[in-house]
Image: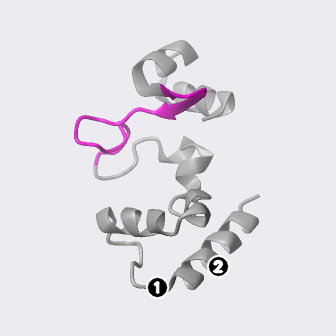
Amino acid sequence: MTEADIHAIARYLGIVDQQMIDSYTTLSGDRRLITQAANGYCVFWDTVCSIHPVKPKMCRRWPFISSVLIDVRNWRAMAASCPGIKADASDQRIIACVKKALANSG
């Protein structure tokens, strides 16, 4: 997440940036990520994304993320938990679609 993401989410929630960081993020290496709830889902997921208008870039891109280009099995892992992701496409088709989506998302 970027500082801009943190600020946008904090404003949307009506809290200060530091409260957003302390309550809703975790550090992974040197990057801030949205924390997972006990059920394994994003803390902002409650049958719908509760911060949808201000969700971070990675969330807006999902499932078209660069880790799929590193290993297409990442796509299949995501598809196992999301019925909206086509799991039976060929590796080449998945990679082509992800590359196109990433190129178009700037």
Q: Amino acid at mark 2?
A: Ala
Q: Tell me the residue that label 2 is attached to.
A: 96
Q: Position of residue 101 (x, y in %)?
A: 66, 69
Magenta portion: prevailing SS class: loop
Q: Amino acid at mark 1?
A: Ala
Could you tell me which secondary element the residue under label 2 belongs to?
A: helix
Structural distance between the alpha carbons of marks 2 and 1: 11 Å
Identify the residue at image location x=40%, y=32%: 35
Against 34, is 19 above or below? Answer: above
Against 101, is 15 above or below? Answer: above
Q: Position of residue 44 (x, y in %)?
A: 38, 39
Callout count: 2
**Most extreme residue toward the left, as rendered?**
39
Q: Earlier in the sequence, mark 2 or mark 1?
A: 1
**What number is the disc on residue 89?**
1
Identify the residue at image location x=71%, y=61%: 105
Identify the residue at image location x=50%, y=62%: 63
Q: Nearer the viewer, residue 96 or 54?
A: 96
Could you tell me which secondary element the residue under label 1 belongs to?
A: loop
- Pointer 2 local density, CA inside 10 Å: few below 14, some 14–19, many at least 20: few
Q: Position of residue 66 (x, y in %)?
A: 62, 58
* Residue span colored magenta: 27-46
Q: Is residue 103 left or right of residue 65?
A: right
Q: Is residue 69 left or right of residue 28?
A: right
The part of the image, by quadrant, that contains residue 17 is: top right
Q: Is residue 44 left or right of residue 12?
A: left
Is residue 63 magenta-colored? no
**What number is the disc on residue 16?**
none
The part of the image, by quadrant, that contains residue 42 is: top left
Is residue 37 magenta-colored? yes
Which quarter shows the C terminus? Answer: bottom right
